[in-house]
Image (cartoon, helix red, strand yellow):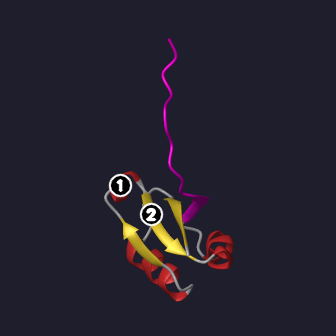
């Protein structure tokens, strides 16, 4: 299963959103940015693609990937 960054609406119901994620077979792997309305979840591609349509609390669902910076001289 792939990791996704889920962005929540301001004032979103965290517990309800967590339950929706779990009902889609996913799990929250990092909620340290919860205060900013962002969660890292691990779930199937199908679950991730349907998540936004299942709850109005979700703004976006995007694949999580490593980002690097390459310095230029």
Q: Specify the principal SS of the magenta part.
A: loop
Q: Residue at x 62, y 72 (%)?
A: 48
- Asked if disc 1 and disc 2 are in contact, CB closer than 8 Å, the reply is yes
Horizontally, is 20 left or right of 28 in the view? right
Q: As drawn, which residue projects farthest toward the front?
A: 73
Quadrant in the rendering for residue 14: bottom left
Per the image, label 2 sits on a secondary structure element best described as strand
Q: Residue 16 lies in magenta, yes or no?
A: no
Q: Residue at x 36, y 65 (%)?
A: 30
Q: Is residue 1 above or below residue 73?
A: below
Gap between marks 1 and 2, in whole Å? Answer: 9 Å
Question: Which mark is on residue 48?
Answer: none
Horizontally, is 37 left or right of 21 in the view? left
Residue nearest the observer in this picture, 9 or 65: 65
Q: Position of residue 12 (x, y in %)?
A: 45, 65
Q: Nearer the viewer, mark 1 or mark 2?
A: 2
1 or 2: tag closer to the N-terminus: 1
Q: Which residue is mark 1?
A: 33
The quarter of the image holding the N terminus is bottom right
Per the image, label 1 sits on a secondary structure element best described as loop
In this picture, which residue range is highlighted in magenta? 58-73
Q: Is residue 70 above or below residue 37?
A: above
Quadrant in the rendering for residue 16: bottom left
Q: Residue at x 63, y 69 (%)?
A: 52
Question: Which mark is on residue 40?
Answer: 2
Q: Position of residue 65 (x, y in %)?
A: 54, 53
Horizontally, is 49 left or right of 65 in the view? right
Quadrant in the rendering for residue 47: bottom right
Q: Is the residue marked by circle 2 packed among few (<14), some (14-19), or many (20+) residues within 10 Å? A: many
Q: As drawn, which residue projects farthest toward the top?
A: 73
Q: Position of residue 51 (x, y in %)?
A: 61, 74
Q: Is residue 17 above or below residue 22?
A: above
């Amino acid at each position: 299963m792939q990791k996704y960054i889920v962005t929540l609406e301001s004032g979103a119901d965290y517990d309800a959103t967590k339950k929706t994620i779990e009902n889609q077979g996913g799990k929250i792997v990092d909620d340290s940015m919860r205060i900013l309305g962002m969660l890292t979840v691990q779930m199937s591609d199908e679950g991730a693609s349907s998540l936004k349509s299942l709850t109005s609390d979700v703004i976006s669902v995007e694949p999580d990937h490593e980002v690097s910076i390459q310095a230029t001289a």
